[in-house]
Amino acid sequence: MSATTARSWFPAGPGAPAGRGAVGDRPQKWGHPVTYFVALLFIGVCIAPVLYIVLGGFRTNSQITTSPAGLPHPWVIGNYVDVLKSNRFWGEFANSLMVALASTLGIVVLGLMVSYAIARYDFRLKGAMYSLFAAGLMFPMVIAITPLYIVVKDLGLVDNLLGVIVPQIAFGLPTTVIILVPFLRAIPDEIEEAAAIDGASRLGFFVRMAVPLSLPGVVTVGILAFIGSWNNYVLPLYILNSQANFTLPLGVQAFSSQYSTDTAKVLAFTSLAMLPALVFFSVFEKRIVGGLTGAVKG
């Protein structure tokens, strides 16, 4: 090995100057200032309404009237305390939680089964089935809300939480299948063959190997399903009639209509209604990005 080659492989001493090939010593390149300005502008547009709603709940109606864009002075926690003490808020919170958990469970379980069959088995109309789920992404629930209401009415599920859960599962499956199929398809066939030699059945391989290996995608679709169900407004608006069955998005609309003169309390109720989804998304943000990245690579 020549001296030049040796110097390129071994690090320089503490007092030696950094070599030209040292990657870690390269100066960091910053982007154009306009790019950062545009990014900060978009961040501000997204965060400003949320901050206004949250801070508005700590103000009085007179403060909002005299200074709509001002900060709370003094800070008032009575609005949030009144909302948290009301049985109405906790009843709607329980309904939203029940609908979101049931919808998420149905979407993840059924989506895993369908995705596994499409990804790991060859059968007739396999491509047509996958294309059908892909086409489902182009038809949002708002477009099909009228025929969907008729179907739910014929099933006798109007003003029933099941009338919201079942359609949400159906409309959540396309996204789930599109994300999970690449994860399940990327599992090497050698692993499945080795599991079969060890005596594992197809169901055993699915439960013990396929699901754990595709866990990033499973977590991603679960988070997306939960947030989408929690924030869903159109479907509960058509299906649920009695206030006892209202979810939080419907509760916000009904509360703002009933207390239209008490703007501060309406803002407090809205803040508490959107807080669980914001916290849930913030905690699992990296999981969502990682899962979607894996789906694209797959």
Image (cartoon, rainbow, N blue to C red):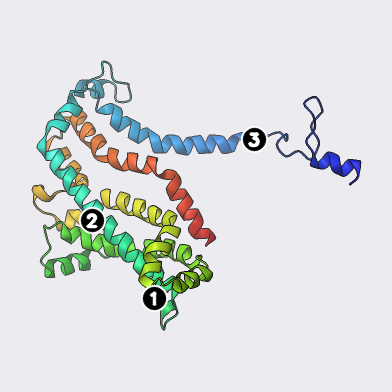
Mark 3 neighbour class, 10 Å CA radius: few under 14, some 14 to 19, many 20 or more: few
| Above or below, comparing residue 227 to residue 197 in the picture | above
Mark 3 vs mark 2: in front: 2
Mark 3 vs 1, N-terminal side: 3
Q: Secondary structure at mark 1?
A: helix
Mark 1 vs 2, N-terminal side: 2
Q: For residue 65, which quarter of the picture?
A: top left
Q: Residue furthest right?
A: 2
Q: Is residue 141 left or right of residue 157?
A: right
The residue located at (45%, 45%) in the rendering is 286
* Distance from the alpha carbon under mark 3 to that under mark 2: 46 Å
Residue for badge 3: 30
- Residue 271 on image: x %, y %: 26, 35
Q: Residue furthest top?
A: 74
Q: Secondary structure at mark 3?
A: loop
Mark 2 neighbour class, 10 Å CA radius: few under 14, some 14 to 19, many 20 or more: some
Mark 3 vs 2, N-terminal side: 3
Q: Is residue 291 left or right of residue 112?
A: right
Residue for badge 2: 102
| Above or below, comparing residue 228 to residue 173 in the picture | above
Residue for badge 1: 129
- Residue 287 on image: x %, y %: 43, 48
